[in-house]
Each structure stands twice: as structure tokens, then as C-alpha cells.
Amino acid sequence: MDNIELENMWRSVYRKLQSELGRAVTNSWIAPMTVNKFVSGTLYINAPSMFLRDWVVNNYSGKILELCQQENGKIRSIDVSVARPAQQRKTYAASDSSEASSVVPVVSKQPDDVMDFGIPLDPKLTFDNFIVGKPNELAYAAAQRIAESETVAFNPLFLYGSVGLGKTHLMNAIAWSIRSRFPRRKIAYMSAEKFMYHFIKSVRYKDTMAFKEQFRAFDVLMIDDIQFICGKDSTQEEFFHTFNALVDNNRQIIVSADKSPSDLDGIEERLKSRLGWGLVADIHPTTYELRLGILQSKAASGSVKIPDKVLEFVAHRVSSNVRELEGALNRITASAMFIGREVTIESAREVLADLLRTSERKVSLEEIQKKVAAHYSIKLSDMSSDRRVRQVARPRQVAMYLAKKLTTLSLPEIGKNFGGRDHTTVLHAVKKIEQALKEDVKLAEDVDLLSNILTK
Ligand code: ADP
Ligand code: MG
């Protein structure tokens, strides 16, 4: 086969692949390939990168061979290897001007398509469905402010917190809210991975200009889980430029991560500092109060009645990650529908056995006292002492509270172990901590941490 025959054959194969696999697939994976030569039964194909080569070999080589054989029965095998662009001949895509616009991924400027560029929004993730408590109130307020604001309030909004605490939820909520309030604004919501994907694609097609233009057309750009670009230097560089261009044009940027800007490793200093310029809002691990609130709200919209006692049990015993909390509730609901009996703490304990893990194990009072004393750096003997200074009295009350929550001991028994205190003292301590937990985030986190340590 001479070059022209090769080219024609490949063109025909390409068209068939396009109709079988769809344009998106062929544009992304097949268009960058070029036929190189045909030698003794083998068709040699060049790929511009190792990544593309592996992908095509693993996913499409069988199909490609089959279609090539339909064109020319002499083809026995195909060989895909990596050739740097300079060594490559003109690509098929570039050689066919009539196809050029479909081959190069161009984002339509029509508003309806804008979201397709990113990730579709989840209809369940709205402000209405977001339960606010101490741990997330700052993030929530900031998100609302951005959604309602006529002008750019602060840039960027940087939301951070560990997994399952509602970052993606808040970003979706902002997008929904802006959409309904300001339908003309163009919003892009995407993961950092998707951002990277678009960028790499534009580099592959030598079309970084179009990439820049696409991003600069957005009024609101949201990038979720920015930690994924840590260590990816060229993507960071591009993000930095995109970021600056948008900020300079008064566009709103919202970014989420699992850490604060300064704690992100593998991110360039100038980008780190730039990320911290606007408002940095952290979402703390959930407290018992917030977990209960979330469970009550989700249970109320569910189809099965779940007694408060059970919700309290779950709020106490399942971790701070809201996704796990939802999982627990779903399981309880499903099993209740399945067995058709009323949900009890016992039945919940059963269906959640693996989630509760070793927390089933009995916690001893000594352990509680030891761990609490260590946590607050006080002497173990102070658990039983008469000292009333706050640095000692508070931890002691926390220990009594945990003893009540985590053991089956009675109030008098607990009191006896705290230097022979009266049961009313213990009750007072429990009440006091319960009240304080509602207002004091730090305390709530301490208590949460301690009960996690003690029950796992
Ligand atoms: P992240 O992005 O921080 O990992 P997500 O936003 O995906 O967490 O939240 C995990 C799940 O928990 C989602 O289903 C979300 O709707 C739910 N969730 C998180 N926080 C809340 C909250 N405060 N109120 C209601 N649901 C929440
Ligand atoms: Mg998320």
C-alpha cells in the first residue's frame, strides 16, 4: 500500500469507528493516531504518547484490527508505538479540514451546554437539604453569600475539610442557587481531575488557546478536590493562569480541598498564597448534635418511621463522615422495610454490626479516665481529686459524661469511681457537658475524638 492508499484506508476505518464508538471516543482516542506504514502483514500506527498508546491498545486494538482487515485482507496485525509529534506525519484529523471542528473538542458557547463541560449537578445537593450546625456554619454562610451576591463577594472561596463533610454538597448548592437566581451566568462545576483532563487534552491537540478561552468564558468556576493537582506542575501552572485571568475579570472562583491552602503539599507557593486570598472556610468534623440533626432530617423524608432513640444511637456510634451516616440510615430503612418490623436499637445494632465495628467492645471506666486525662494532659489521680480548677474540673466532667454514654454503669457507680462523688454530681456533669456540646465546637471535637478512640 502506498501512502495514499494507507491514508484512504485509515480514513475509512476511522469513519466506521466513529459510527460504532461515537464521536466522543474517536475524537479523544483515535484521532490523535496516525498510520505510519504497512510492512509484511503489519500495519504500524503511531500514537503521540505512551498513555494514549496503552489506552488504545488495551481498549480498541481488536476493533481496529477487525475494521482494517475488512478494508485490506493482507493486514494480519497492528502495531501501535509512540512517536513524538515531530516524527509523525500529518495527523488524520488535521488533514481533513471538513472534520476539523468535530475532531478538536470545542465547547459550544450555548449556556445549556456549559454544564456539560463540567460535571452535571446533583439535584439532591441543594441548600434546602443541607443541615447547618456549628462545624459547618461558616462554610454554609460563605456559600450562601456567594450564591446571593450580585457582585463578587470574595475571591476565591476556598472550602476545605476531610472527606464526606459536605464540600461537594455546598458547591452544588451554590450552583443550583445561582442558576435559579441568575440564569444568565455561566457556571462550570468540575473536579480538579476533570480540569486536568481538559487541559491535557488541549495540549494533545495543541489547542491550549481554545482551552483558555473556554475557561475564561465562565462567570463562576468551581473546582472540587483541588488536592488532585498537587504535584502536577503543568496543570497547576495552567490553573494558576486561568485563575488569575478569571479573577482579573471579576469572575467568581470556588475551590474545595481536603486541606487548607497552606497545608496542601506539592502546590506551588504562589498558587498556595493566591488560593488563600479570598475567604478560607473550613468544615469541621461533625459533632453529635449535627449528626443527629442530619439523621432526623433525612429520616423525616424517608418512608419508614425511625424512633428518636435509634437515631440517637446511630449519631453516637457512627463516625463523623456524613456519607457513612447516610449509609447507616439507608441500611436501617431498608431492613425495616424488608422485615416489616419496628426499628429498635437492637435491630439497628444488628444491621450496622460492621459499621459499629469494635465499638461494641466494653469500654472500662479506667480506660476512659486514662484517655481523658492524657488528652487534657492532667494527672490520672486528678480524676478522683478534689481540685476544682477548671483545667481539671472540665476534663473530669468530660470523663463522667463519657462514662455515662459509653458504659452501662449507673450514676452512683460512676461517682464512686471518681473519688467517691455523689450521683447528683455525676448527673450535673453529664448535663453540663451535654449543654456545652451544643455551643462549644472545640469541646464537641474533643468528646468526639475521645469516644472514637475509646470505642474503636
Ligand atoms: P465531601 O465532598 O466533603 O467529601 P459530600 O458533599 O460529598 O462530601 O457529602 C457526602 C454526603 O453527605 C452527601 O450525600 C451529602 O449530601 C451529605 N452531607 C454532607 N454534609 C451534609 C449536611 N450538613 N447536611 C445534609 N447532608 C450532608
Ligand atoms: Mg466531594
Image (tube, rainbow, N blue to C red):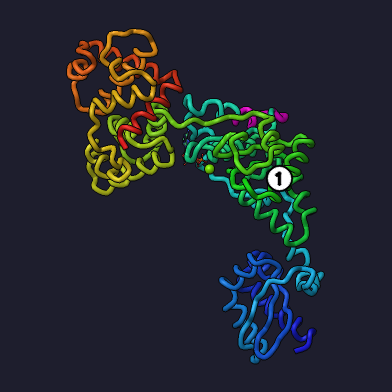
Q: Position of residue 25 (x, y in %)?
A: 63, 66
Q: Residue at x 68, y 41 (%)?
A: 268
The residue segment tinted magenta is 143-153
Q: Is residue 163 above or below residue 94?
A: above
Which residue is nearer to you in this view: 172 or 62? 62
Q: Is residue 156 left or right of residue 92?
A: left
Q: Residue at x 60, y 41 (%)?
A: 265
- Count of labels shown? 1
- The kind of secondary structure element at disc 1 is helix
Q: Is residue 54 left or right of residue 130?
A: right
According to the picture, the residue beneath numbered tag 1 turns out to be: 239
Q: Residue at x 35, y 13 (%)?
A: 392
Which residue is nearer to you in this view: 174 or 396? 396
Please tell me how crowded label 1 is: few (under 14), some (14-19), or many (20+) other residues with Cα within 10 Å.
many
Q: Amino acid at mark 1?
A: Phe
Q: Is residue 420 above or below residue 127?
A: above
Q: Residue 147 lies in magenta, yes or no?
A: yes
| Quarter occupied by residue 97 | bottom right
Which residue is nearer to you in this view: 400 or 211? 400
Q: Position of residue 414 (x, y in %)?
A: 21, 19
Query: Which quarter of the rendered picture does the N terminus lie within?
Result: bottom right
